[in-house]
Amino acid sequence: MKYDLIVIGGGSGGLTAAAGAASFGAKVALIDRKETFGGDCLHYGCVPSKALIHQANRYYTANQEASRQGVALTVPFERIKEAVQTAIETIQHHDSDERFQTLGVDVFHGAAEFTGRRKVKVNGQVLKGKRIVIATGSRALQPDIEGLKEAGFQTNETIFTMPRFPKRLAVIGGGPIGVEMGQAFARMGSSVTIIDRSEKILSREDDEIRDFMTDTLSKELEIRSNTEVSKVVLNNGKKILYVKRNGKEEELEADEILLAMGRVPNTEGLNTDKAGVELDEKGHILVNGYLQTSQKHIFAIGDVTGKFLFTHSAGQEGKTVVQNAIFGVKSAISYENMPWNVYTKPEVFHLGMTEEEAREKHETVTVYRKKLDEVDRFITEEETGVIKLIMDKKGKILGAHAAGEGAGDWMQTVVYAKTNGQKLRSLSGMVYPYPNKAAAIQAAADLYWREKLFDSGLKKVASNYIKWFR
Ligand SMILES: Cc1cc2nc3c(=O)[nH]c(=O)nc-3n(C[C@H](O)[C@H](O)[C@H](O)COP(=O)(O)OP(=O)(O)OC[C@H]3O[C@@H](n4cnc5c(N)ncnc54)[C@H](O)[C@@H]3O)c2cc1C
Ligand SMILES: NC(=O)c1ccc[n+]([C@@H]2O[C@H](COP(=O)([O-])OP(=O)(O)OC[C@H]3O[C@@H](n4cnc5c(N)ncnc54)[C@H](O)[C@@H]3O)[C@@H](O)[C@H]2O)c1
């Protein structure tokens, strides 16, 4: 069979590319080695994790109220897991084979491998593609730690269906997966320890945001930074982790271990060498700004490139590839306005440069920050947090960061402003319905305005005018 486009991998990136190309009339083949489409995000990532976080927060609130009344609750782990699966099944309809077949896409379920520059084999059948997209995603890094395999561990592929609720959970890795899952299990009643070899968790976040989150999370779970696991021993069903912290050996007992130490790209078995596609030393597919691999007709998107490991970036890359592969235009991807959220309580929002990155790249950087417990709605809801807006000397937004309840939603306004080249004053100048949470943006942006006013001659003119008017 001959295709205009063969898409390998039916996750966030591949589905966007396949649906987009088919909607423009291209003949598309979509291949996934799993029985259902949706990839990690739907089955083992965003969807189950956000559903679990929601259930954990519901239980946490109910449990806090119950303990105030002197009642002890037991976590309904089976019910929580069912709710997680229901969320997956509900969203699965959107990613069903039927939906793609209706769009005119030929659907294949089986592991794909290259047999030539334009040839892909699946289930013994060889498909020919004018253009090919590799969107095979990533999986959890499983390190070579002595005794770990024998002791057993969970990854994002097993934790949402794990049979027993762990009273004590050791999470190795304090990135987004580690903190989101760590806090969710802590809120369901597990005693959670996050172990990270780095000095600080959430290493991609702005320092102030990270410090705020570290303090906040430390109230609910234990964080051991500068710590590495050297050995795991299984003892009477318990997992003993031998950890090294600042050169000192310590022991940590847990019922379960979650690996959240980063990802490895799914390039094994693809036979990329037969297509002449180059990989980096970690197995990521190398791409240029147009998302072309070392073979101009083969593109790669999503986690497999190791760039921005998010569903929305895989989707954005999928859209870019449709333009480049189907219309033959040369549209370059830009990550300058790519935001992300970490869905802890409170949430973390990240856009553009951190303060440290901005100071490295720009001579003059101004930062406007506001503590959220100085913003009315956060006061009424007894919440804390911080917002930071970072700009260059001309008022261009370089970065925006927040840690606060719902920040992932109410900070979206800043994404709009930055994407459209709006300056900070545009965020100050619009009306915010009182007392919404987004007013935190105005409160921070107003600082810029006030500074401008005080620095300018306007204040002197105004006070002379007022004196004269009196
Ligand atoms: C626990 C967790 C929580 C997350 N939460 C969020 C979040 O809240 N927001 C967010 O934006 N991102 C989140 N992510 C990241 C997000 O899931 C990924 O960035 C996204 O799924 C990447 O999409 P992708 O298309 O590159 O890969 P995937 O969605 O993983 O799809 C790859 C597909 O390729 C298939 N495949 C692999 N090899 C082959 C082969 N040889 N032949 C055929 N098919 C193959 C796989 O079966 C899979 O279906 C989370 C990830 C995890 C693990
Ligand atoms: N809300 C979201 O958008 C969301 C949620 C979850 C995951 N994700 C995506 O998934 C990706 C993977 O997440 P992740 O948390 O697994 O990876 P990560 O790379 O973000 O974090 C891994 C952490 O593990 C630590 N680590 C690595 N090796 C270690 C070792 N040997 N011992 C102790 N600690 C070690 C690192 O220092 C780091 O802090 C993220 O980059 C993110 O893009 C996104």
Image (cartoon, rainbow, N blue to C red):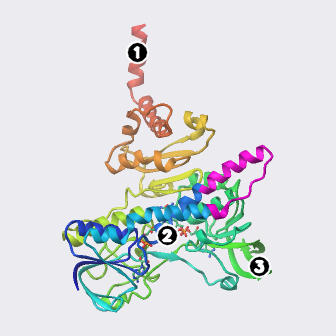
Residue 70 covered by magenta stretch: yes
Residue 85: numbered disc: none
Say if mark 1 contacts mark 2, CB within 8 Å.
no
Amino acid type at circle 3 is Gly
Badge number at residue 464: 1
Secondary structure, mark 1, is helix
Q: What stretch is highlighted in magenta?
A: 55-79
With 393 as the anchor, is 205 left or right in this view? right
Residue with the most extreme top position: 470
Quadrant of the displayed image that contains ligand 2: bottom right
- The x and y percentages for residue 415 are 39, 50
As shown in the figure, which amino acid type bears the numbered disc 2? His
Q: Which amino acid does label 1 sit on?
A: Asn
Q: Mark 2 points at which residue?
A: 43
Residue 66 visible in rendering: yes
Q: Is mark 3 within 8 Å of ligand 2?
A: no
Dot 2 or dot 3: first in sequence order is: 2
Q: Mark 3 points at which residue?
A: 237
457 falls in the magenta region: no
Q: How far apart are marks 2 and 3 (CA)?
A: 28 Å
Q: How far apart are marks 1 and 3 (CA)?
A: 80 Å
